[in-house]
Image (cartoon, grey):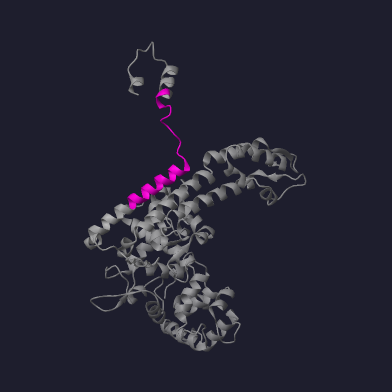
Amino acid sequence: RFECFMPLSPAVLTLSNAIERLQAANAGSTVLPTEKSMHAAEEQEFQKLQEQEQREAEQRCPSLRSIPRFYERKVANSQSTPQDEESTSLRPRVLREARSQLLQRKSSKELLDEEDLHGILALLKEHAREKQTDDGNVDLEVIDYNGFSKIREELVKRGERFRQFFLPSTFMKFPRDQSGCMSIVPFFTFIVRKVNLKQTRVQLSYYDALGCGYLREKDMENFIFEMIPTLPQLNSLQEEFYPFYVFTAVRKFFFFLDPKRTGRLRIRDLLSSPILPELYELRQEQPLRASEAESNWFSMQSALKVYGAYLFLDVDQNGMLSKNELSRYGSGMLTDVFIDRVFEEYQTYRDAETGEREMDYKTFLDFVLAMENKNTHQAIQYFFKLIDIQQRGYVDGFTISYFFQAVIKQLHHKGPDIPSVHDVKCEIFDMVKSKTACQISVQDLMECRQGGTVLSMLIDAAAFWRYDNRENLIMEEDDDDIGF
């Protein structure tokens, strides 16, 4: 069929002639694939993967050419090693490919893009009704159910993906005026948020390597690492700092969403938590104000501040923190008893030369998150594990005395103004109002709304001194600067 491509003079070859010749050349040669042919092509590609896997396995173990494999080691989802992955690598590869194609189809068929959102907003304004406000002005930002239905009919012609946003039940969820009209602005905001939520759900699912609805720590690290170049607020972040930024960002997710330390984050929990929106604040083009950057854990300023504090504490510059180095944190008035308990309960590593237990950067991040968010349930759980020295699930008068004796030791130079142990015990029990007399559980600390204050009084001498002298102290911008 090459005769149709023979050169012709411009006078003879016109556009219509070229199209007719091209159609004639392709007549009968281009056939739409049937479901059967698509299934056959899929089986053929799968067979190629199997054959490739067999060849790679025979290269690793030549005996497989004569003795077939009759046993496959079961791979644990969360504790699999590279060797385990190699023994059953075909299955996860097929699952990843199938999941990727499924997410692509869902993205194209169910998700709205920016052009779709602009189209919805234009139709909402087109079908809006005039509404007279109390001051006599005309407000066009309302729509009745008839206009709502007309928009749905028009959008469904463009695609079924629009129908989910224009159901009658959706209209009934919004407050309406006496004429039965709802405001356009909150409805359109609802659509944008729902679209963003679905887009985020699909985006997170790409990193769900096991396809089980949760992300492991390395999955979250991949997610954060690949997101860094897309966040304008991190444009000036140096690539050498990327790994430390990833560790810093990921630890907040796991500290607050995985308090039981399972090593997994359910995607459902990620979507419903306020932590992900805090990360997405870095998408805005305008620079964050100083106060916003300081309060946002994921900002470059905040990450550099935390990492800088770690380097400052690491006096011997071996990349790890000893007990003496960690005791310099904050005001430097953390009690020795508390520091000892941190190193007893949470993951540390033994120094090969000195034999002393030391803390790495990830464990330090958990410590910082707990210290900076003492009133949260996760931080209270973190600290309660440290003060529950007898592991009975509650703290009694003996435990309070044990920890407060260390506070008195830190404040020995303050003289006779330090309250007695008995007075402090009585005040703590009065503050908590525990359900069981003289026994404070972790639930009691969470429900009394003063759990962070109580814990600070037992672990930090500076925090106790500030609490005890709260009526005499003048509020300062940085109360950690008070000298001791």
Please provide percent x and percent y for residue 10.
37, 13
Is residue 351 shown above or below 17? below
Q: Main secondary structure of the magenta part?
A: helix
Please provide percent x and percent y for residue 109.
52, 44
Quarter occupied by the C terminus: bottom left
Q: Nearer the viewer, residue 28 or 268?
A: 28
Please provide percent x and percent y for residue 402.
45, 86
Q: Nearer the viewer, residue 483 or 103?
A: 103
Is residue 286 shown above or below 336? above
Q: Is residue 120 visible?
A: yes
Q: Is residue 304 visible?
A: no
Q: Which residues are magenta?
A: 24-49
Q: Is residue 372 magenta?
A: no
Is residue 316 shown above or below 458? above
Q: How many marks on residues?
A: 0
Q: Nearer the viewer, residue 273 or 217?
A: 217
Name the side, left or right, on which 286 lies relative to 168: left
The image quarter containing residue 326 is: bottom left
Quarter occupied by the N terminus: top left
The image quarter containing residue 55 is: bottom left
The residue positioned 43% from the left and 52% from the top of the image is 98
The residue positioned 47% from the left and 43% from the top of the image is 35
> Furthest-top residue in view?
11
Please provide percent x and percent y for residue 259.
47, 70
Name the side, left or right, on which 71 lies relative to 190: left
